[in-house]
Image (cartoon, rainbow, N blue to C red):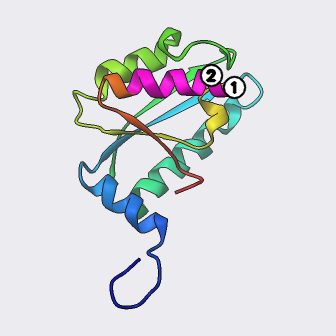
Amino acid sequence: MTPGNGRARPQRRRLEQDLLATDRAVFYHLADAETSGDLNAQFEAAREWCRRAGVELAGYYVDLGLPGSTAFCERPAAVELMREAPAAAARWVLVTDWRRVGVNKTVGQEAAQVLEQVGLQFRNMKSA
């Protein structure tokens, strides 16, 4: 709650403040063959989200055609992301939808744990 006015601050504001602490993010997307055509729209959504949040978008990482059950640490673009993003001073990995991380909760949790080991965290652009 905000002191003095009795109203809660919007969660979006808190997220933007967290992001501004490091001001760099990367975008990750797991695209199947059917949805690969909308990648430009996904990239534009990531650029717009970062512009609104005042965050620099430091890179894009896309794994194309892999099943959502593939472990995050076995995906070529995800491995590249984990290697490059910390060196680029990125702290956040933006996704448009949790389904673009993995097909089930177990894969998503594993991905979050692997990212945490290299100092990165997921941010879902839809819920922020």
Position in image of residue 41 (x %, y %): 61, 46
Distance in Å between CA atoms under marks 1 and 2: 6 Å
Asked if the residue under mark 2 is in contact with the one under mark 1, i.e. CB atoms within 8 Å, the reply is: yes
Q: Which residues are magenta?
A: 104-115
Number of marks present in the image shown: 2
User: Which sits in the foreground, 87 or 38?
Assistant: 87
Mark linked to residue 67: none
User: What residue is at 69 percent from the left and 33 percent from the top?
Assistant: 37
Position in image of residue 45 (x %, y %): 55, 51
User: What residue is at 60 percent from the left and 21 percent from the top?
Assistant: 107
- Residue type at the position of mark 1: Asn
Q: Is residue 3 above or below residue 9?
A: below
Mark 1 crowd level (few <14, some 14–19, many ≥20, 10 Å Cα): few
Is residue 91 visible in the rendered structure shown here? yes
Q: What residue would you read off at disc 2? A: 106
Is residue 54 visible in the rendered structure shown here? no
Position in image of residue 28 (x %, y %): 50, 32
User: Which sits in the foreground, 18 or 35?
Assistant: 18
Is the N terminus in the top left, top right, bottom left or bottom right quadrant?
bottom left
